[in-house]
Image (cartoon, helix red, strand yellow):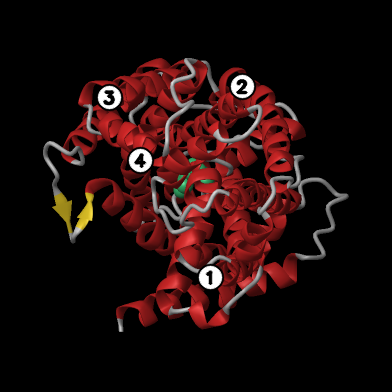
């Protein structure tokens, strides 16, 4: 397939909104607050920020370089750049990780639609904490409702993905991302002006380093990979749609900074409210579904804020699922030479099957466990804390040691005015710092 036919983002703004759209998702608004809550708040935040800078930006950059040099999907890119080697297995692990993530991510994305619906129908109002918990439990125990929303979310993906890169992903992201930022700012302002919210900000920003253990470090690393959408080829795939004249260094920085700011903004929106109403910040995966409605229905304007909030998460989740979906779809289009529409349907059907199995088996009726974790927690842990950092490790090794500086330089200097003075520094991190740091964390965790 020629490069012209496979699609390109048509503008700088399009690249940024699509890539930030991939990065900003449930990871920022659902996962970040609860993982930070369980791992000590402020101390976790500092370790996390360090990983975004020292590992996240270099991996983002490395993935963009791979994707745009090869102009191909996650597997095809490695095949093109390192033919007759096993490097394409890194891409294959990425396709597998996409499957695993989507199998639970789409389900949770579906929950946000249920809560959006319940907010609009005003069914959350007047319920106390226990009642709200009961409502959540009976909802997730209902196979028909959870599966219905899962498939609705899937359908939205199919519609947008089959419309293509520019007319689908880029067009929708341009509209959805500004909406998301607006909603988040409104909710953030409301939350910090709540009485008693101060403690929440202290929890988020005051570090207590005695809380930092190897598990906290691994969680922070996994959260950085998950939140930035790196380590499995989503950014390789999006990079392959970036025009040669666009600046990859600036894109990596912008995406990392925007994603981090939005995670912090989500923390600022959620923790003050959690503390103001005396809720446990270590509530876990249910944090936003059981505590946030609790918060909203106790405050003035709660009806409208609740609608805003769940709309916000649904939007954030949608632009993220698009990037995961596109990893599989572009792989099918290019490696099996099938049409985009068919490829997106095949993707949907296969995830429909794995996602349904995951949903049904994590349900209260039939509670399957792997390594003492529920299926969802297992899929989340295995991908975020193991597969993504491992993928990231191999990606920086590939760009640093196989691809080498000369080719990297050529790839980023298509346009003469990108001097890329940051290159020696970032290449040093890619070659030495990032791989060593990831390896040390893995080794420490195993020992
Ligand atoms: N980053 C997204 C979030 O924070 C999720 C996501 C999209 C993702 N694409 C990914 C995670 C690729 C890992 C890899 O919600």
Q: Say left or right for 3 vs 291.
A: right
Work out how far the residue at label 2 is from the one at label 4, CA to CA, in angstroms: 38 Å
**Dot 3: what SS?**
helix
Q: Which mark is residue 172?
A: 2
Work out how far the residue at label 2 is from the one at label 3, CA to CA, in angstroms: 25 Å
Q: Is residue 326 above or below residue 236?
A: above
Precedes in sequence: disc 2 or disc 1: 2
Which residue is disc 1 drawn over?
Answer: 401
Residue that appears at 53% across and 70% down: 401
**Looking at the picture, how far across and down is residue 46, in whole percent?**
62, 70
Residue 407 visible in the displayed image:
no
Q: Tell me which corner region of the image, top left, top right, bottom left or bottom right, holds residue 215.
A: bottom left
Which residue is disc 3 drawn over?
Answer: 147
**Dot 2: what SS?**
helix
Q: Which mark is residue 130?
A: 4
Precedes in sequence: disc 1 or disc 3: 3
Precedes in sequence: disc 4 or disc 3: 4
**Looking at the picture, how far across and down is residue 53, in whole percent?**
65, 65
Of residues 69 and 383, the one nearer the viewer is 383
Residue that appears at 34% across and 57% down: 381
Q: Is residue 409 above or below residue 292?
A: below
- Disc 2 vs disc 3: which is toward the camera? 3
Q: Is residue 282 above or below residue 138?
A: below
Work out how far the residue at label 4 is from the one at label 3, CA to CA, in angstroms: 25 Å
Precedes in sequence: disc 4 or disc 1: 4
Q: Say left or right for 138 vs 149.
A: left
Residue that appears at 55% across and 65% down: 41
**Dot 1: what SS?**
helix
- Disc 1 vs disc 3: which is toward the camera? 3
């Amino acid at each position: 397939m020629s490069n012209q036919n496979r699609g390109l983002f048509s503008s700088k703004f399009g690249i940024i909104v699509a890539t930030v759209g991939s990065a900003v998702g449930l990871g920022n608004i659902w996962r970040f607050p609860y993982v930070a809550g369980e791992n000590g708040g402020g101390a976790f935040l500092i370790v996390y920020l360090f990983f975004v800078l020292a590992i996240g930006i270099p991996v983002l950059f490395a993935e963009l370089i791979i994707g745009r040099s090869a102009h191909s999907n996650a597997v095809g890119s490695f095949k093109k750049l390192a033919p007759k080697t096993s490097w394409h297995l890194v891409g294959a692990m990425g396709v597998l990780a996409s499957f695993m993530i989507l199998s639970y991510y789409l389900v949770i994305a579906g929950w946000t639609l249920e809560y959006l619906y319940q907010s609009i129908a005003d069914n959350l109002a007047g319920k106390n904490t226990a009642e709200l918990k009961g409502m959540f439990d009976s909802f997730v125990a209902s196979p028909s409702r959870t599966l219905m929303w899962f498939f609705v979310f899937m359908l939205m993906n199919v519609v947008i993905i089959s419309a293509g890169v520019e007319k689908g992903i880029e067009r929708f992201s341009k509209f959805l991302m500004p909406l998301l930022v607006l909603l988040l700012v409104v909710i953030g302002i409301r939350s910090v002006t709540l009485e008693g919210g101060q403690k929440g900000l202290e929890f988020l920003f005051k570090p207590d380093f005695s809380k930092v253990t190897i598990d906290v470090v691994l969680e922070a690393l996994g959260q950085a990979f998950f939140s930035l959408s790196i380590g499995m080829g989503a950014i390789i795939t999006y990079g392959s749609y970036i025009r040669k004249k666009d600046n990859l260094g600036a894109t990596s920085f912008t995406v990392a900074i925007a994603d981090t700011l939005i995670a912090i903004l989500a923390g600022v929106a959620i923790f003050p409210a959690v503390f103001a109403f005396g809720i446990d910040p270590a509530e876990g995966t249910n944090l936003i579904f059981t505590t946030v409605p609790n918060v909203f229905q106790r405050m003035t304007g709660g009806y409208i804020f609740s609608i805003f909030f769940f709309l916000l998460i649904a939007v954030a989740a949608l632009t993220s699922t698009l990037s995961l979906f596109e990893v599989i779809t572009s792989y099918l289009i290019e490696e099996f030479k099938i049409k985009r529409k068919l490829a997106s349907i095949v993707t949907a059907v296969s995830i429909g099957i794995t996602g349904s199995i995951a949903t049904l088996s994590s349900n209260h009726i039939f509670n399957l466990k792997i390594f003492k974790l529920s299926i969802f927690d297992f899929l989340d842990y295995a991908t975020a804390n193991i597969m993504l950092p491992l993928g990231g490790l191999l990606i920086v090794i590939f760009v640093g040691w196989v691809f080498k500086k000369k080719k990297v330089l050529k790839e980023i200097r298509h346009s003469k005015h990108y001097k890329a003075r940051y290159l020696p520094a970032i290449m040093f991190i890619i070659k030495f710092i990032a791989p060593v740091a990831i390896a040390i964390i893995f080794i420490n965790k195993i020992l």
